[in-house]
Amino acid sequence: MEPNHIYQFSLLNALMDGVSETGIPVSKLLTKGNQGLGTFARMNGELLLLDGKVYQLQAEGNVREAGPDEQIPFAVSTQFEAQRSVDVALKSKDTIDEALDAFNDHAKNLFMTYRIHGKLEYLKCRTVRGQSYKGEPLSDLGKKQSVEEYHDVVGTIIGFRTPKHNQGYGVAGEHLHYIADDRSAGGHVLEVKAKEVQMQMAVASNLHIELPTTEDFNAASLVTDDEGVKKVEG
Ligand SMILES: [Zn+2]
């Protein structure tokens, strides 16, 4: 992967339609960059790729390292090389947006990637519990997600920001995942507060999308469900 190019397997819309039986193996995703996020087969937990390892962030905030053959039905990743690094106080998730806007005022219609590291005073994370039947839509899984709160933890948040008008097709989205430095906890970030953390960021203008060639993907409606996405992705 060239630096700051984005690789994505499948579409968020397909995930919303419940397409998550198979995908690419973890070993392949590991060749697609040094940071990324996504989910596992049957949407069992959240995925986080960080510096050569793929982690499964499970319900109740537990973390395990994924094996090379595990299937990834949806992932977005990049070979992240910071173009700017700033120290920021995070009042809320909105501060992340403001920092991205301040870095590059032409980024409105570009993809942005970032990595935040440091002490987080408050974190609220969710993890999807997984489908209870094949094809169960992500919007239904959102109703039984596990939500955890953390105080005064040290860890890394990685994220992707999609241009507002490109969100419909299910590319990248507005997405950030957290993992503790000691790998004791992790999840999809719903809320965050920090007095001072380091935030590294980069603009991404190249996108590689690989689509599943399965029957399930072919049968998916891929209708854009902005409301549904907003509900599960926070
Ligand atoms: Zn997520």
Image (tube, rainbow, N blue to C red):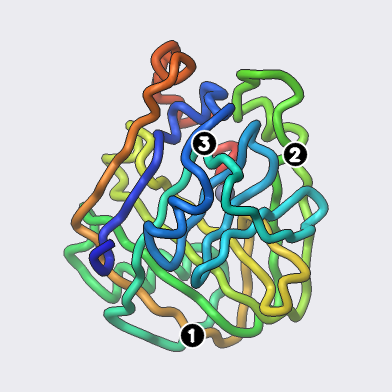
Q: Earlier in the sequence, mark 2 or mark 3?
A: 3
Q: Label 1 crowding class (10 Å Cα cut-off): few <14, some 14-19, many 20+?
A: some
The x, y position of residue 110, in whole percent, is 22, 56
Q: Secondary structure at mark 3?
A: loop
Quadrant into which the N terminus falls: bottom left
Of the residues shown, which amino acid type is indicated by label 1? Gln
Q: Which residue is mark 2?
A: 129
Q: Label 3 crowding class (10 Å Cα cut-off): few <14, some 14-19, many 20+?
A: many
Tell me if 225 is positioned left or right of 194 in this view.
left
Q: Earlier in the sequence, mark 1 or mark 2?
A: 2
Residue 220 is drawn in which quadrant?
Answer: top left
Residue 91 is drawn in which quadrant?
Answer: bottom right
> Is the shortest distance between ligand 1 and the CB of mark 1 under 8 Å?
no
Of the residues shown, which amino acid type is indicated by label 2? Arg
Position of 112 relative to 141 (above/below): below
> Is the shortest distance between ligand 1 and the CB of mark 3 under 8 Å?
no
The x, y position of residue 105, in whole percent, is 20, 68
Q: Which residue is mark 3?
A: 73
Q: Label 2 crowding class (10 Å Cα cut-off): few <14, some 14-19, many 20+?
A: many
Position of 8 relative to 178 (above/below): above
Q: Is residue 234 visible?
A: no
Q: Are marks 1 and 3 in contact (CB under 8 Å)?
A: no
Q: Are marks 2 and 3 in contact (CB under 8 Å)?
A: no
The x, y position of residue 167, in whole percent, is 34, 39
For this orientation, the residue located farthest to the top is: 219
The x, y position of residue 226, in whole percent, is 44, 31
Q: Which residue is mark 1?
A: 198
